[in-house]
Image (tube, rainbow, N blue to C red):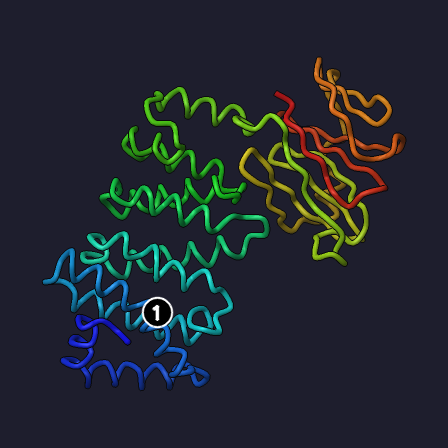
């Protein structure tokens, strides 16, 4: 069942809505109208209810925009009961209604922004979509404009594990009111210029342990053979089973992109003087980190902020902060 508010709008504009659905079926021959109906109940109705409560005079326009976008998303298989990306359904049902005042004035922009973000975050292996949704919902009352929604969404995507967003997210955070930027990093009461400088200067700020990344493809991981790693200023170029990748990692997560054999050959092989292997442990200055691999054949690669440790005995890459 749908809400009385949504039922009333659909009934009053029945001919217009039916015409739009008919046109969508011409554009998307595989469009499942039963799935579309389910998404209207599950994803669109909560938006209509929220906008009706926040700005009843604008609920008609917002409903029409959401209806059109829902047809397209279900037509592409991105939304509905059989969606390729179930997280998108959750974002429409639970997150988007939190932005009812913005939806009332700019429904296409808000729904497009949230939908694109949901698709992207859910597609990044190792990212934490539920964290992004939870933290963005918590900040919704403080977000007053589309630009702020875009910037906060990018910051929170980085914090939810989309590591390659780091520099863009810091630049976006600089456009926010300082209090909102600090709230996005869960550091109320701090000074934004200092927090920004620390985040920019140290990719591992707040994470002294580093992280482990990667596993065998037969177990759902990324690497067919134990990886070899070389450093670049932005991350590490990885070779495994004649395939090459760029690994970007920081305090919040690690993301794997495609790379080339040429990039691997051109990557750095040097090592800071403060780093050395001692049996089955690695020494970083005064710190000693025990490694869960047999001694011997341990390989190291380092850029300015991070040490990557690999071994022929594991498909995982150990990433350790150098700071």
Q: Position of residue 222 (x, y in %)?
A: 70, 52
For label 1, the crowd category at 10 Å Cα-Cα, with few meaning under 14, some 14 to 19 and many 20 or more, is many
Q: Residue at x 50, y 56 (%)?
A: 122
Q: Is residue 64 left or right of residue 242?
A: left
Q: Position of residue 171 (x, y in %)?
A: 40, 35
Residue that lies at the very extreme toward the front in this rendered image: 1
Q: Residue at x 63, y 47 (%)?
A: 256
SS class of the residue under badge 1? helix
Q: Is residue 180 above or below residue 148?
A: above
Of residues 315 and 141, the one drawn nearer to the viewer in this rendering = 141
Q: Quadrant of residue 80?
A: bottom left
Q: Is residue 205 left or right of residue 269?
A: left
Q: Position of residue 112 (x, y in %)?
A: 34, 59
Q: Quadrant of residue 37?
A: bottom left
Name the image quarter holding the C terminus.
top right
Q: Which residue bears the numbered disc 1?
A: 42
Q: Residue at x 42, y 62 (%)?
A: 88
């Amino acid at each position: 069942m749908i809400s009385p508010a949504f039922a009333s709008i659909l009934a009053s504009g029945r001919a217009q809505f039916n015409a739009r659905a008919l046109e969508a079926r011409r554009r998307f021959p595989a469009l499942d109208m039963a799935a579309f109906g389910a998404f209207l109940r599950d994803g669109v109705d909560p938006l209509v209810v929220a906008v009706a409560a926040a700005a009843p005079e604008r609920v008609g326009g917002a409903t029409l925009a959401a209806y059109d976008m829902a047809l397209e998303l279900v037509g592409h298989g991105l939304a509905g009961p059989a969606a390729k990306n179930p997280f998108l359904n959750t974002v429409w049902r639970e997150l988007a209604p939190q932005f009812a005042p913005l939806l009332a004035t700019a429904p296409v922009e808000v729904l497009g922004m949230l939908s694109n973000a949901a698709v992207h975050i859910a597609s990044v292996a190792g990212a934490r979509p539920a964290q992004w949704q939870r933290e963005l919902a918590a900040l919704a009352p403080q977000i007053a404009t589309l630009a702020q929604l875009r910037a906060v969404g990018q910051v929170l995507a980085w914090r939810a594990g989309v590591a390659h967003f780091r520099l863009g997210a810091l630049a976006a955070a600089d456009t926010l009111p300082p209090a909102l930027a600090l709230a996005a990093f869960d550091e109320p009461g701090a000074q934004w210029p200092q927090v920004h400088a620390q985040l920019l200067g140290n990719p591992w700020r707040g994470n002294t342990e580093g992280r482990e990344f990667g596993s065998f493809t037969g177990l759902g991981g990324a690497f067919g053979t134990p990886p070899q790693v070389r450093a670049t200023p932005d991350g590490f170029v990885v070779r495994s089973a004649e395939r090459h990748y760029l690994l970007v990692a920081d305090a919040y997560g690690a993301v794997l992109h495609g790379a080339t054999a040429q990039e691997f050959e051109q990557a750095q092989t040097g090592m800071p003087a403060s780093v050395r292997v001692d049996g089955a442990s690695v020494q970083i200055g005064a710190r000693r980190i025990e490694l869960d691999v047999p001694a011997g054949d341990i390989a190291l690669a380092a850029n300015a902020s991070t040490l990557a440790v690999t071994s022929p005995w594991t498909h995982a890459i150990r990433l350790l902060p150098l700071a």
